Image (cartoon, rainbow, N blue to C red):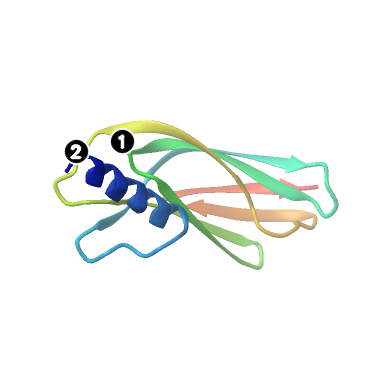
Amino acid sequence: MGPLRGISAFWLLLCVVQGAEASPSMTTTAVKVDTVKTVALQTFPIQIQVIITGRKLAGVAVQMRQQRIGKDVVVTMTQISTPGAEVRLVPFTEQLLLEGGFAVGTYTLRINDYRTSFEVS
C-alpha cells in the first residue's frame, strides 16, 4: 500500500502542475502573499518579472493564473489540499513573468489580496 500512496501523490502533483481541476473531495484556497517586487526586463516590448514571497501549505503545489484588462493585471495564486491534510504554513518565493508586453505607463497589479502598482518608463 505504500507504493500506491507514492503514485497517488505523484499523480496529484502532476494534475496540479498541469492545471487540472480539484476533485470535489479537495479544497482550493488562496496562498498568503507577503511581498511583491516587480522588475522591468530590458526587452522589446518591455516584459515584467514579478518576485512573490508569502506562505503556503507545506507539500502543496501552487497554481497561478493571470488576467490582464488594460492597465490592470490580476494574478490568482491558489493551492489544492486534501481534507485532513497537515496544516503547516511554509515560506515560498515564486517568480512569474507577466504575459504580454508593457507600454509606457502606470499599471495596477493585484495578487490575491495584495495590491501594488508599477511604472514602465
Q: Is residue 112 visible?
A: no
Relative vertical location of residue 15 with respect to residue 40 in this rendering, above or below: below
Residue at horizontal 70%, vertical 54%?
106
x then y, percent, for residue 97: 64, 48
- Name the residue tied to disc 2: 86
Dot 1: within a 10 Å radius of its alpha carbon, few (fewer than 14), some, or many (20 or more) residues?
some
Q: Position of residue 116 (x, y in %)?
A: 55, 47
Q: Amino acid at mark 2?
A: Glu
- What residue is pinned by disc 1? 58
> Image point 34% across, 31% down: which residue?
90
User: In the structure shown, which secondary structural element does the residue marked by tag 1 occupy?
Assistant: loop
Give whichever of 18, 8 is nearer the camera. 8
Q: Nearer the viewer, residue 70 or 81?
A: 81
Whichever of labels 2 and 1 marks the residue nearer the N terminus, that label is: 1
Taking the view exactly as shown, the residue that stands out farthest to the top is 91
Tell me: 11 left or right of 98. left
Q: Answer whether labels 2 and 1 touch (C-beta < 8 Å).
A: yes
At label 1, the amino acid type is Ala
Horizontally, is 74 left or right of 27 in the view?
Answer: right
Residue density around tag 2, few if under 14, some if 14–19, many if 20 or more, within 10 Å? few
Q: Position of residue 120 (x, y in %)?
A: 76, 49
